[in-house]
Image (tube, rainbow, N blue to C red):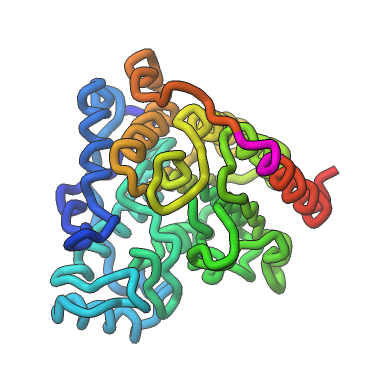
């Protein structure tokens, strides 16, 4: 038995929006192909998702909302939200199998079968209790965090998708058992609109939501500054027992929907540090999920590199998947990020 499980079903291909919609399952198939070409599955076990029931969805979604999705899935037309997430025939089943993949990733880590559970087909952080959004139908990130509370008292979600995980935040805003950290692009009128520094949780969950809003043009140097000066000390203080890491590929400099400027090297530095912290505090336990990413080539390369690092099989073959070099922010952007970091240090008492 290997330490890492890669959750996969060919039914993942069904979750792909029609026409010129930017969300296509080609990303996952390209990433899996890159891993196959490098012999990754000699060292990582491929596991089929175990299909969950509707009762499991009701941990975070309402019965009415689930029925709405099922009806739109049969109808196969219209939208599930204000216009980002179109319905298509079978979207309910397509969403369910992917969420099931994330639940399976959690289960195999919880029962000790594996140290790492990887589901690049997951990461639907915009879905809310009664609402779809941002190409997301059911929120697997919040779901597995709530499910994990049966076995762990300190769970950390680290979301490096280019968009703010508004659904995850809303569903877990008052939950003190889940530390929610999101690094994302932020400016007026950018989807989904929230995720500023002053959104820190409510009730018992106050202080357990950490938003790191980054200006357009944030490249590796500024991104890693924010990560190392805010995320790392917060995780060191929190000492998570389980880490859920959402590796959205849309923070990459070539993504068509987001204007962050991370390179594959910047991504790898973040993944390495999270991996290191997981072995320091969580006995290595990481659930890795996918997320956004609309330059399919870049996203596939990011995911393959991330999987290789987490599974401890990263070598020269994965070096070939990198961009040419690290990226650099303008001085203007760097100063803006430094200001955000200082605000966060004050808000979250990082001295």
Q: Which of the pair 24/150 is nearer the observer?
A: 24
Q: At x 22% / y 78%, what residue is drawn?
A: 70
Residue 318 covered by magenta stretch: no
Please state the horizontal and vertical placement of residue 22, each as a whole percent of the image.
Answer: 29, 56
**Residue projecting furthest to the top:** 316
Image check: 146 left or right of 232? left
Provide the residue span drawn in magenta.
329-334
Q: At x 40% / y 50%, what residue is drawn?
A: 106
- Look at the picture and state if 69 lies above or below 229: below
Please state the horizontal and vertical placement of residue 83, each as a whole percent of the image.
Answer: 33, 74
Image check: 103 left or right of 148? left
Image check: 149 left or right of 64? right
**How many numbered marks does the figure carry?**
0
Majority secondary structure of the magenta segment?
helix
Quarter of the picture holding the N terminus? top left
Q: At x 71% / y 73%, what residue is drawn?
A: 203
Which quadrant of the view contains residue 47? top left
Q: Which of the pair 19/115 is nearer the observer?
A: 19
Q: At x 64% / y 70%, what residue is drawn?
A: 174
- Look at the picture and state if 315 lies above or below 24: above
Which quadrant of the view contains residue 318? top left
Please state the horizontal and vertical placement of residue 134, each as a whole percent of the image.
Answer: 39, 65
On the question of residue 340 being in view, the answer is: yes
On the question of residue 156 being in view, the answer is: no
Which quadrant of the view contains residue 213? bottom right
**Residue projecting furthest to the right:** 351
Quarter of the picture holding the C terminus? top right
Please state the horizontal and vertical placement of residue 248, each as a whole percent of the image.
Answer: 43, 47
């Amino acid at each position: 038995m290997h330490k890492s499980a890669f959750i996969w079903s060919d039914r993942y291909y069904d979750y792909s929006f029609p026409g010129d919609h930017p969300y296509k399952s080609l990303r996952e198939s390209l990433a899996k192909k890159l891993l196959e070409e490098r012999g990754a599955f000699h060292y990582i076990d491929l596991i089929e998702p175990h299909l969950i029931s509707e009762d499991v969805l009701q941990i975070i979604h309402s019965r009415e909302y689930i029925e709405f999705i099922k009806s739109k899935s049969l109808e196969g037309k219209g939208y599930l939200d204000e216009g980002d997430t179109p319905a298509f025939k079978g979207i309910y089943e397509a969403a369910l199998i992917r969420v099931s993949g994330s639940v399976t990733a959690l289960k195999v880590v919880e029962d000790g079968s594996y140290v790492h559970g990887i589901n690049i087909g997951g990461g639907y952080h915009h879905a809310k209790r009664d609402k779809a959004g941002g190409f997301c139908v059911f929120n697997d990130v919040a779901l597995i965090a709530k499910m994990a509370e049966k076995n762990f008292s300190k769970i950390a979600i680290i979301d490096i998708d280019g968009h703010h995980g508004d659904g995850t935040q809303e569903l877990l805003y008052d939950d003190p058992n889940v530390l929610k950290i999101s690094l994302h692009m932020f400016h007026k009128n950018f989807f989904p609109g929230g995720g500023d520094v002053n959104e820190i949780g409510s009730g018992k969950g106050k202080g357990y939501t950490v938003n790191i809003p980054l200006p357009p043009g944030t490249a590796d140097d500024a991104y890693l500054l924010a990560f190392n000066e805010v995320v790392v000390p917060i995780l060191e203080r929190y000492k998570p027992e389980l880490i859920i890491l959402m590796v959205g590929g849309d923070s990459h400099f070539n993504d068509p929907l987001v204007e962050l400027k991370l390179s594959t090297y910047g991504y790898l530095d973040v993944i390495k540090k999270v991996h290191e912290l997981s072995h320091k505090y969580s006995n290595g336990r990481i659930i890795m999920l996918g997320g956004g990413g609309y330059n399919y080539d870049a996203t596939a390369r990011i995911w393959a590199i991330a999987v290789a690092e987490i599974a401890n099989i990263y070598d020269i073959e994965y070096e070939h998947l990198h961009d040419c070099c690290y990226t650099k922010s303008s001085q203007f952007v760097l100063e803006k990020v430094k200001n955000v970091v200082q605000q966060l240090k004050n808000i979250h008492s990082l001295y």
